[in-house]
Image (cartoon, helix red, strand yellow):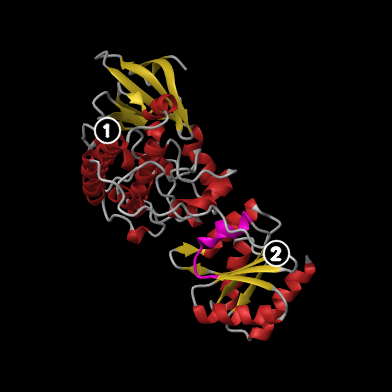
Amino acid sequence: MKGIFAAKYILRKQIGEGASGKVYAASDVNSQAEVAVKVLDQSLARDPRFIERFKREAETLKAFNHPGAPKLLDFGVADTGEHYLVMEFSKGKNLKVVLDEERKFAPAKALRVTMEILSVLDAAHARGIIHRDIKPDNVMIFPNDQIQLLDFGVAKLKERKSSGVTMEGAAVGTPYYMSPEQASGDKDIDHRADLYSVGVLLYQMIEGSPPFDGKSMMHTLLMILTHPIPKLKVDAPKSLNETLEKAMAKDRDTRFPDAESFLKSCEIALRDVVSGKKEEAPEPEKPKGIVLPEKTRPRILCLDDQEMIINIMKHLLEHEGYEVITSTSWEVIHSFLFTNAVDLLVSDVEMPGMSGTAICKLLKQTMPELKIVLFSNLPERELEQLADESDADMWISKNWSPPKWLEIIKGMINAG
């Protein structure tokens, strides 16, 4: 698309394209000022609620003024029916391009860039603006390590009514920077999702790759939800690893409460990096997976946050000759399911900080052959509905007697 657009702008060339639309380098017909015009995908306007949401979000963004974000100058609907946003033209270099060229930064530079991003987010969050799509593609960097953050609000505009994470994950493009709550399809996303994504970006700038990179999109999402945060391989002070761990905590309630707190932690880490302070007691790298002996009998993985329930289930199943692995944490998912043959997963519906139904749905798409039983004391009708929605193979009520638990599990194992 080139030429006059919306009777006000001359589109010169396309400079970007994403799930929400195309971006053009352009100029204002009257002032000749350089601008960037984002023409949103027309499919977004099929939702009847989109137009009001578009106006509301655009008005909020137009009032936001920060040197670290190109100002929204104009928005509207062209005579072709296309919704558009007009922003100041950023003359920085795209961070993704820079990382493709340099692969990674020295920790001090990575921290300085991160602090610039957090400064912008602190101002945006104070106005109730959540970015939702922090990634290298949306960061422009300048020679003095200052930045501009692109695409504010567009991620919210492109949200669609969907029952699963896969559709929205595919729409966003790459899952690497998604927070666990975004990866699990949670609709209640707040500013702490941005902080998680900035933590991922900081890790990538230092290490040269994101912390979680699976064999497929679904595998990556599962790693985000279940795998422990890897420590930096580079020589770094304890304060830097602690900053990353807090920024990327699975449970958002244990993350930094706001961008300002995250920024202050980065300042401490930067001082330690510049002074040459090192990790006082480096821990040996944890193994990537736990390898069990060769399987000679059916293997069952049981997850529940109640020790008593776990112990009853373990005793019951081992008495029948099954090999039983138990845990109160989702983190074992990656260690066992992707490195060992498990015949059946029995999982509580609500593990701490994580939805069992969301994990179940992702696992069934990644490992359709894995049998999954949801386990809960929810009302039976509600539990049955959750099992159906998450593609679980069966469900068991904790209110039933243990012999009935065993009957259902034996039936699942024998059916395979």
Percent position (x, y) of residue 117?
A: 28, 38
Q: Which residue is mark 2?
A: 343
Dividing the picture into quarters, in which one does residue 341 lie? bottom right
**Magenta part of the chain:** 327-339
Secondary structure type for disc 1: loop
Q: Is residue 71 above or below residue 4?
A: below
**Of residues 290 and 79, which is closer to you in this image?**
290
* Residue at image location 30% in from the left, 24% down from the top: 90
Q: Which residue is mark 1?
A: 69
Secondary structure type for disc 2: loop
Q: Amino acid at mark 2?
A: Asp
Q: Does any portion of residue 89 appear in the rendered image?
A: no
Can you say which quadrant of the picture contains the C terminus? bottom right
* Residue at image location 37% in from the left, 33% down from the top: 138
Q: Is residue 416 magenta?
A: no
**In the figure, is residue 80 to the left or right of 30?**
right
Q: Amino acid at mark 1?
A: Ala
Dividing the picture into quarters, in which one does residue 7 lie? top left
Q: Is residue 256 above or below residue 49?
A: below
**Of residues 352 and 112, which is closer to you in this image?**
112
Q: Nearer the viewer, mark 2 or mark 1?
A: 2
- For marks 2 and 1, give the CA distance: 51 Å
Q: Does any portion of residue 39 appear in the rendered image?
A: yes
Q: Earlier in the sequence, mark 2 or mark 1?
A: 1
